[in-house]
Amino acid sequence: MAGIREELEKIKTQGVEEAELRRVKAQVLASQVYQQDSLFYQGMLIGEWETAGLDYRDRDLRFEKLKQVTSDQIRDVAARYLVDDRLTMARLEPLPVDASKPLKRGFAGGAHVR
């Protein structure tokens, strides 16, 4: 967890490198475009936007705003919100699986999830 805190501190003090920011923006935009190939994801996106009080038809505006995000803005938001008194971190450690016991049905995790 110390590594996560170190990375957050770097973002809060230095922002992110322009090359990394360009890469992430390209990934997010590509993901949004590829989701349009699926009727399921189109419906899901419309539902998410409408639930949040946004007009799903403003997709192009959202893309333009995303393209305008700067490293300085990311640094400022990180410094404001990614602070210890707002931080929640969890370490997930799976329970051992006993292969001699059959899986319990009714939930996706199987017998090793309680």
Image (spheres, rainbow, N blue to C red):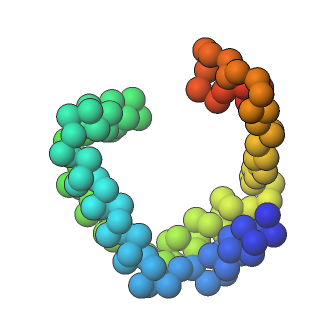
Percent of width and height locating residue 65: 31, 62
Residue that appears at 80% across and 54% down: 85
Quadrant in which the C terminus appears: top right
Residue 71's spot in the image, x, y percent? 48, 78
- The reply, left or right, for residue 2 in relation to residue 53 is right
**To which quarter of the image does residue 69 belong?**
bottom left
Q: Is residue 4 left or right of residue 38?
A: right
- What residue is rendered at 39% in x and 29% in y? 51
- Vertical placement of residue 95 versus 87, above or below: above
Q: Nearer the viewer, residue 111 or 54?
A: 111
* Residue, far front: 100
Residue 53: tell me if it is visible. Answer: no
In front of the other: 78 or 43 = 43
**Which sits in the foreground, 15 or 93?**
93
Using the rendered view, name the quadrant where residue 11 is placed. Answer: bottom right
Q: Residue at x 58, y 65 (%)?
A: 77
Identified at 75% across, 72% down, the residue is: 3
**Is residue 98 toward the left or the right of residue 8 in the image?**
right
Along the line of sight, which residue is nearer the eye, 75 or 4?
A: 4
Most extreme residue toward the top, as rendered?
Answer: 106
The quarter in which the N terminus is drawn is bottom right
